[in-house]
């Protein structure tokens, strides 16, 4: 937005008051009323992201550890627990508090019920579109991966559901792990004439030609709007390169600026970026690229209840992030006059399944999609005695369960599990069905491994991943949280220099020896050699372990989280939650 200083101060106020309405009792009350949102302005965007193939309502615990480093410390999105509620002006114990935070999670989940589900989401989308003619529904990606049925149907269940939901524009990340040919097939066939797949930062490796359209132009109430796509820039690093061997990615900041400038020169009134960068990257990008009215971000699963205004040389860009797993729908209303955005309203709306009636057509489609797999999905493997959750910078209890199972089944001293953020939560006493397990494991490169690694190599792995997570320059953060560990105790100083964040490593209480080789179990290797060598998929081993648990019950898992240095006063640290 090209705002002067006075208008920028008004935007800051709007972010805190109009966009979030901090003083409104609606945010502290039970849900229902805040779904009744009067129309504002003449251009609207609905934004979902990172649903990870979750068609049904679920529980999903927000992080208790979400640390920021450098200038990001204590800033959105790096807030956890009580700090989230304080910054958002949300009353503890309220439905909104449960949606946004990890506090008292099991009890609050019982009280407020499950969140998300495409049938309930569809109801809200339909309701908002009825009051906002021409509103565009944006999908930030990570939609075709994260469930058993998405894996077993090669993403087709999610493609069908997103079409019925009415998605207008999409970009991607985990979609690419289905392979380049599969993504292009969906875009050319299933999406043709309905959904635009945009990615300005993907090009052919040989001649640098665009693989997908960089942007799409849409009209809303006589206003021309451009949606530019930004796929996850580190796809070939975070995921196997062999899925997209002929494509290049990257942030492509200069190229993005050229796209924005060209659109503005054509007189486009509203220009937004549909991004899968991760919020820290989006915040930096917004400070350096001129002419974007908003960035609708994803990848880091951050549920941020306001649009963060970022100043740049051309004005102000609003940065948003709409959570994950179908829990939220972002709503951005713009008032556009004389060819530019004059004002806005933003809300992050939780999808409480008890408060939104399921859309009949979507419910019928979901039932049809799941019918061939119901018996497999619903088989109970064990019952959990404790809360199982995953999201956070370090080990969650789901991660610990996976590491414990791999160590036992692979006869390994240690285990590594990737720092994935996807996968729902289970409350104490709930069944671990095959479906719930696959929510944690369903990927196209699931091979379980057992590797001999020296102590020096183990430390190097931890240091490398820690730098990806805690590098003070967001452009060097390559996605994912810290690798999860089993059988290893260690200490981490997030603010330390590269190569000096990890120390005090111990195995069975004994110091890790640099020259000693340890058996390490793992999975999800990005190496093509591992794929070619073959081996059992990770879910086979974890299922076997679960079925062997005494009495069919899994004791509460205590995560092997590291001792953290220098974070006691960090608003992104809420360990007691």
Image (cartoon, grey):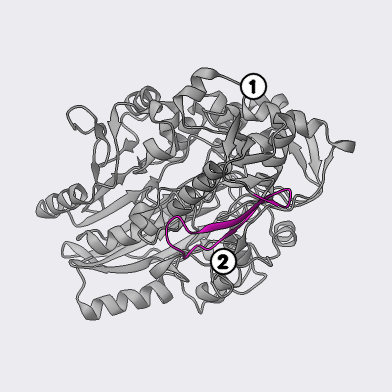
Residue 62 horizontal/vertical position (percent): 59, 57
Vertical order, 150 against 122 (above or below): above
**Is 47 on the left or on the right of 389, as rendered?**
left
Q: Is residue 506 magenta?
A: yes
Mark seen at residue 372 = 1
Foreground residue, 157 or 283? Answer: 283
Residue numbers of the magenta segment: 489-511
**Is 164 on the left or on the right of 398, as rendered?**
left
Label tally: 2
Residue tagged 2: 80
The image quadrant of residue 292 is: bottom left
- For the C terminus, the quadrant is bottom right
Kindly tell me whether residue 531 is visible in this rendering: yes
Residue 157 horizontal/vertical position (percent): 52, 29
- For the N terminus, the quadrant is bottom left
Residue sticking out furthest to the right: 551
Residue at (52%, 28%) from the top-left corner?
A: 445
Residue at (70%, 57%) from the top-left corner?
A: 109
């Amino acid at each position: 937005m090209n705002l002067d200083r006075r208008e920028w101060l008004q935007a800051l106020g709007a972010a805190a008051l109009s966009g979030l309405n901090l003083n409104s009792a609606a945010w502290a009350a039970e849900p229902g009323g805040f779904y009744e949102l009067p129309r504002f302005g003449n251009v609207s965007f609905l934004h979902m992201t990172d649903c990870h193939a979750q068609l049904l309502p679920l529980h999903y615990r927000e992080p208790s550890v979400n640390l920021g480093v450098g200038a990001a410390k204590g800033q959105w999105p790096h807030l956890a627990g009580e700090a989230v509620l304080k910054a958002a002006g949300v009353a503890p114990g309220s439905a909104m508090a449960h949606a946004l935070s990890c506090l008292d999670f099991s009890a609050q989940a019982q009280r407020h019920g499950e969140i998300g589900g495409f049938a309930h989401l569809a109801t809200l989308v339909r309701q908002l579109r009825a009051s906002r003619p021409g509103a565009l529904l944006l999908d930030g990606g990570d939609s075709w991966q994260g469930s058993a049925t998405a894996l077993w149907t090669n993403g087709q269940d999610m493609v069908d559901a997103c079409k019925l939901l009415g998605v207008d524009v999409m970009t991607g990340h985990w979609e690419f792990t289905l392979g380049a040919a599969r993504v292009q097939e969906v875009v050319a066939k299933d999406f043709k004439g309905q959904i635009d797949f945009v990615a300005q930062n993907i090009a052919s490796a040989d001649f640098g030609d665009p693989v997908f359209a960089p942007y799409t132009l849409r009209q809303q109430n006589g206003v021309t709007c451009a949606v530019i796509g930004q796929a996850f820039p580190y796809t070939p690093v975070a995921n196997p390169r062999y899925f997209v061997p002929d494509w290049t990615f990257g942030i492509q900041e200069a190229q993005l600026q050229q796209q924005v400038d060209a659109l503005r020169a054509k007189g486009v009134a509203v220009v937004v970026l549909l991004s899968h960068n991760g919020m820290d990257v989006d915040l930096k990008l917004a400070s350096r690229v001129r002419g974007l009215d908003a960035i609708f971000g994803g990848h880091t699963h951050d549920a941020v209840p306001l649009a963060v205004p970022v100043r740049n040389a051309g004005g102000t860009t609003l940065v948003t992030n709409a959570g994950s797993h179908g829990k939220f729908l972002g709503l951005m209303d713009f008032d556009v006059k004389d060819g530019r955005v004059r004002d806005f309203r933003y809300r992050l709306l939780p999808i409480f399944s008890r408060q939104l009636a399921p859309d009949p057509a979507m419910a019928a489609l979901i039932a049809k999609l799941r019918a061939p797999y119901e018996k497999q999905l619903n088989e109970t493997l064990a019952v959990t005695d404790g809360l199982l959750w995953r999201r956070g910078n370090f080990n969650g209890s789901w991660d610990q369960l996976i590491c414990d199972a791999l160590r036992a089944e692979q006869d390994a001293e240690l285990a590594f599990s990737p720092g994935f953020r996807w996968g729902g939560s289970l409350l104490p006493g709930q069944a671990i069905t095959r479906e719930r397990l696959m929510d944690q494991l369903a990927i196209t490169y699931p091979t379980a491994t057992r590797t001999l690694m020296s102590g020096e190599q183990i430390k190097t792995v931890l240091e490398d991943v820690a730098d990806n997570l805690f590098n003070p320059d967001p452009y060097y953060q390559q996605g994912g949280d810290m690798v999860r560990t089993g059988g290893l105790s260690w200490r981490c100083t997030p603010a330390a220099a590269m190569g000096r964040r990890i120390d005090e490593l111990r195995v069975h209480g004994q110091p890790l020896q640099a020259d000693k080789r340890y058996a390490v179990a793992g999975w999800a290797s990005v190496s093509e050699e591992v794929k070619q060598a073959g081996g059992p998929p990770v879910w086979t081993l974890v299922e076997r372990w679960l079925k062997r648990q005494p009495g069919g019950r899994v004791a509460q898992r205590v995560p092997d989280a590291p001792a953290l240095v220098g974070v006691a006063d960090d608003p992104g640290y809420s360990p007691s939650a």
